Image (cartoon, rainbow, N blue to C red):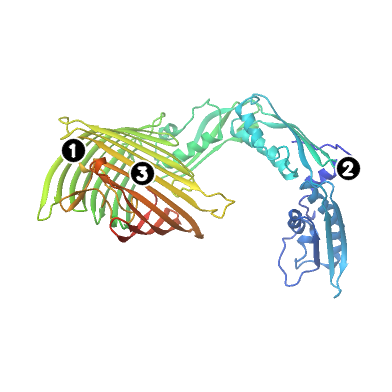
């Protein structure tokens, strides 16, 4: 794809050797090195640190030093090759003026040996770079990105490996943006050993930009092809991009229909037909079962022991509709639920409807809730939104000391939620952030006992520590959360629309939902809430991390009554395949007591 020319006498030959002999081997094959009790011969290397390891691993004399198949008469061959090999290694690293001496030695105990000395001299630096793109990609932002990603900019040391790597990267980046037929039109590396300078010239012919072609879907038996087509983030004829393929694959995996997904471009079809202007896409799928019953057990310090029996149907009425239903039993909660979802359409929209029955008993408040909802959502690669109409009824009993006060509440609310996730992993993130917002409203007399507007927001950020610092491998996690209900009173508003705090996923050091408004001997939800948290995790060993944290916030009925409280402590994290398993020991400063919190994963 490129060639290296002679700029000064002898330089072209040395540079060619750097590219062709950098990793030498015997023509008949070299057996892998093996450890021996006593080396076959001594090997002394005097060279810059950057070259030492390569001289031991990429020369015959280095590779055979401990090999049990070594024969003494082979040493003469190794010594004869060592000078050429050492020069090639030095030139590949940019030491074009290197002088190499190789000698056989004999120790006092008559043990044979080899001494390699490399006087590297000055190192060659890239003095000039000319990188040009010809074809339709010329003058586009992609051309600038190619220059920014080039591994040998002016002022850096010239390395033959990075010279070749850089040219491969140019073609890979162009191919990922649709220029699949890109090629290196010409390349030159002019090296002057007197000035230790290298002038680099690369000309790339981008070729035409190809488009997405037809989908070749394999593995569909249970579900309609429309499920796959609707999840495609591009149309046939759109400019081809590798990122588009990754987004398509991610959507298919997250859809719930498939156990295995593999989306790849059919580059063979492109290569065999030079006139082709599109890239066919091969989609290989392994389907989930249409119906499944699942069981689960677990434990957390917030909800206590839990058991779940669930039922899934992935193809209701033969139209790809999904049903999720189940029964959940916890020490503080019992819930029965069912949700039905349509497949996403080509615009990323989906209809949902569902119902939930729940009994919750916590902090002196007992509620029996019924919720039905219907709505339409939209999902892109990073953003999910949902508009819904929800009807809630609630029978509530509150411990007021000698007895329980009882009331009933209802609300018909129109709501909108918006969630952004930009994370390196949704299971165990170490970098990125999430933002969640919700707004809902109800009007008295229209299915509701009281008019109110509910506002809520939450943001979480993950900062990895710099790799060149003493904190390398650690991560700092920040959280802010706030909510407010606009209404003259909290009375007659179903408790799910109010705010409480406390617990493993909130303010640690306090009981689950134990921060709120006191009503009799109970803690109930209030109209305002705000909290913030800062946590630092640092690797101890393997998948185990230590953590320290500080949480502060509270919930109240009015901002005038809001008094923040703090919780802080330390814990351990196990990065399991299902997400981080968290065990914390936290001090609740307002209650002057210590609590243990156990949970799995993050709440987004």
Q: Quick one: 345 or 58, which is closer to the camera? A: 58
Splitting the image into 4 quarters, where does residue 135 fall?
top right
Residue 12 is labelled as none
Neighbours of disc 3 within 10 Å: few (<14), some (14-19), many (20+): some
Q: Which of 381 and 437 lies nearest the eye of the viewer?
A: 437
Residue farthest along the right direction in this orientation: 9
Q: Residues within 10 Å of mark 1 (few under 14, many from 20)?
A: some
| Residue 439 image-quadrant placement | top left
Residue in the image at 39% along x and 30% along y:
345
Which residue position holds label 1? 489
What secondary structure is found at the residue carrying circle 2?
Answer: loop
Q: Which residue is mark 2?
A: 10
Instruction: Of the two numbered discs 2 and 1 on the same chain, state the one appearing first in sequence.
Output: 2
Q: Position of residue 459 (x, y in %)?
A: 39, 41
**Image spot of residue 301 (x, y percent):** 31, 58
- Name which of mark 3 and mark 2 comes first in the sequence: 2
Which quadrant is the N terminus positioned in? top right
Question: Does 29 sit above or below residue 485?
Answer: below
Helix, strand or loop at disc 3? Answer: loop
Q: Nearer the viewer, mark 3 or mark 2?
A: 2
Tag 3 residue: 290
> Residue 375 at what x, y percent from top left?
29, 33
Q: CA distance from mark 2 to mark 1?
A: 90 Å
């Amino acid at each position: 794809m490129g060639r290296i020319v002679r700029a000064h006498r002898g330089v072209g030959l040395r540079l060619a050797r750097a590219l062709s002999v950098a990793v030498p081997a015997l023509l008949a094959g070299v057996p892998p090195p093996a450890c021996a009790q006593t080396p076959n011969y001594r090997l002394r290397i005097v060279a810059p640190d950057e070259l030492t390891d390569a001289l031991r691993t990429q020369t015959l004399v280095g590779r055979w030093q401990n090999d049990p198949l070594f024969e003494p008469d082979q040493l003469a061959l190794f010594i004869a090759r060592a000078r050429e090999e050492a020069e090639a290694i030095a030139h590949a690293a940019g030491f074009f003026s290197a002088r190499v001496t190789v000698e056989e030695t004999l120790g006092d105990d008559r043990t044979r040996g080899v001494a390699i000395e490399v006087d590297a001299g000055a190192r060659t630096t890239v003095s000039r770079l000319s990188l040009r793109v010809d074809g339709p990609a010329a003058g586009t932002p992609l051309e600038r990105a190619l220059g920014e990603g080039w591994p040998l900019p002016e002022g850096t040391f010239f390395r033959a490996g990075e010279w070749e790597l850089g040219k491969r990267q140019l073609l890979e980046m162009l191919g990922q943006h649709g220029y699949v037929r890109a090629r290196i039109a010409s390349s030159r590396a002019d090296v002057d050993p007197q000035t230790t300078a290298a002038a680099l010239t690369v000309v790339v012919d981008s070729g035409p930009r190809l488009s997405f072609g037809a989908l070749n879907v394999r593995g569909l038996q249970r579900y309609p092809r429309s499920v796959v087509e609707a999840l495609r983030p591009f149309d046939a004829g759109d400019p081809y991009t590798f990122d588009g393929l990754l987004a398509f694959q991610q959507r298919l995996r997250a859809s719930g229909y498939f156990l295995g997904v593999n989306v790849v471009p059919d580059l063979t079809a492109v290569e065999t037909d030079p006139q082709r202007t599109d890239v066919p896409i091969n989609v290989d799928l392994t389907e989930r079962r249409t119906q499944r019953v699942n069981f689960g057990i677990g434990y957390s310090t917030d909800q206590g022991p839990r058991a779940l029996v669930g039922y899934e149907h992935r193809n209701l009425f033969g139209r790809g509709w999904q049903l999720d239903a189940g029964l959940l039993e916890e020490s503080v909660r019992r819930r029965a639920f069912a949700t039905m979802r349509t497949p996403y359409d080509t615009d990323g929209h989906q209809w949902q409807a569902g119902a939930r029955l729940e009994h919750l008993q916590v902090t002196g408040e007992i509620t029996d809730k019924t919720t039905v909802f219907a709505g339409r959502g939209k999902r892109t690669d990073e953003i999910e939104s949902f508009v819904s109409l929800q009807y809630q009824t609630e029978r509530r009993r509150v411990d007021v000391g000698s007895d329980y006060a009882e009331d009933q509440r209802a609300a018909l609310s129109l709501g909108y939620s918006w969630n952004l996730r930009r994370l390196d992993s949704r299971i165990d993130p170490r970098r990125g952030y999430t933002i969640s917002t919700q707004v809902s409203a109800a009007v008295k007399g229209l299915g509701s006992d009281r008019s109110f507007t509910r506002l809520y927001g939450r943001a979480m950020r993950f900062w990895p520590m710099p790799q060149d610092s003493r904190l390398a491998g650690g991560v700092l996690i920040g959280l802010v959360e706030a909510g407010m209900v606009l209404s003259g009173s909290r009375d007659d508003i179903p408790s799910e629309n109010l705010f409480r705090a406390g617990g493993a996923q909130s303010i640690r050091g306090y009981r689950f939902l134990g921060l709120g408004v006191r009503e009799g001997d109970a803690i109930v939800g209030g109209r305002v809430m705000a909290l913030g948290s800062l946590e630092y995790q640092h690797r101890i060993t393997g998948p185990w991390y230590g953590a320290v944290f500080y949480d502060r916030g509270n919930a109240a009925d009015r901002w005038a009554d809001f008094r923040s409280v703090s919780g802080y402590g330390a814990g351990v994290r196990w990065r399991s395949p299902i997400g981080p398993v968290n065990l914390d020991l936290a001090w609740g400063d307002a209650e002057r007591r210590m609590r243990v919190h156990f949970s799995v994963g993050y709440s987004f």
